Image (cartoon, rainbow, N blue to C red):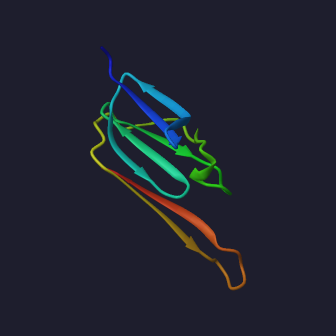
Amino acid sequence: ALPCTVLTLSKGGQSLWKDQLPGTSCSAIAASKSWLVVGTSDGCVQIYGTSPSLGWASASAFRSHPPFVFGRPIVALYLRECSFSRSSGAQNERSTELLVV
């Protein structure tokens, strides 16, 4: 049987969102307030986003980018979100850094 990675967001035992990555298994995962990143044994990285206002409480996600293909199994993922302001009085901006090993 082919492996299949199944990602599920659930609340109170009820599945609210689901996605499948057929033909591979999850080898690394990282999450932040806005992003979910999944690394697979076939060397792909899938990036999911969620509601910018509700975050993961919205119980929904979407593939925000096409898969990044590295060609080697993903060993670890590190994800960091930062807030900064470019000038005084400006609204804070957010930046996200992703390290793939």
Q: Could you tell me residue 11's position as x and y percent?
A: 53, 44
Q: Quadrant of residue 45?
A: top left
Side of 1 relative to 57 (left or right): left
Side of 50 relative to 30 (left or right): right
Give the tally of numbered discs. 0
Q: Name which residue lies at 51% across and 60% down.
A: 96
Q: Name which residue lies at 37% across and 46% down.
A: 29
Q: Could you tell me residue 56's position as x and y percent?
A: 57, 51
Side of 78 relative to 60 (left or right): left
Q: Is residue 99 above or below residue 61?
A: below
Q: Where's the N terminus, which quadrant?
A: top left
Q: Is residue 83 above or below residue 18?
A: below
Which residue ends up furthest to the bottom in the rendered image? 88
Q: Could you tell me residue 23's position as x and y percent?
A: 37, 22
Q: Could you tell me residue 70's position as x and y percent?
A: 36, 38
Q: Is residue 14 above or below residue 88?
A: above
Q: Quadrant of residue 95?
A: bottom right
Q: Name which residue lies at 65% across and 73% down.
A: 92
Side of 43 relative to 84 (left or right): left
Q: Name which residue lies at 51% across and 68% down.
A: 82
Which residue ends up furthest to the top in the rendered image? 1
Q: Quadrant of residue 64?
A: top right
Residue closer to the observer: 45 or 57: 57
Residue closer to the observer: 81 or 15: 15
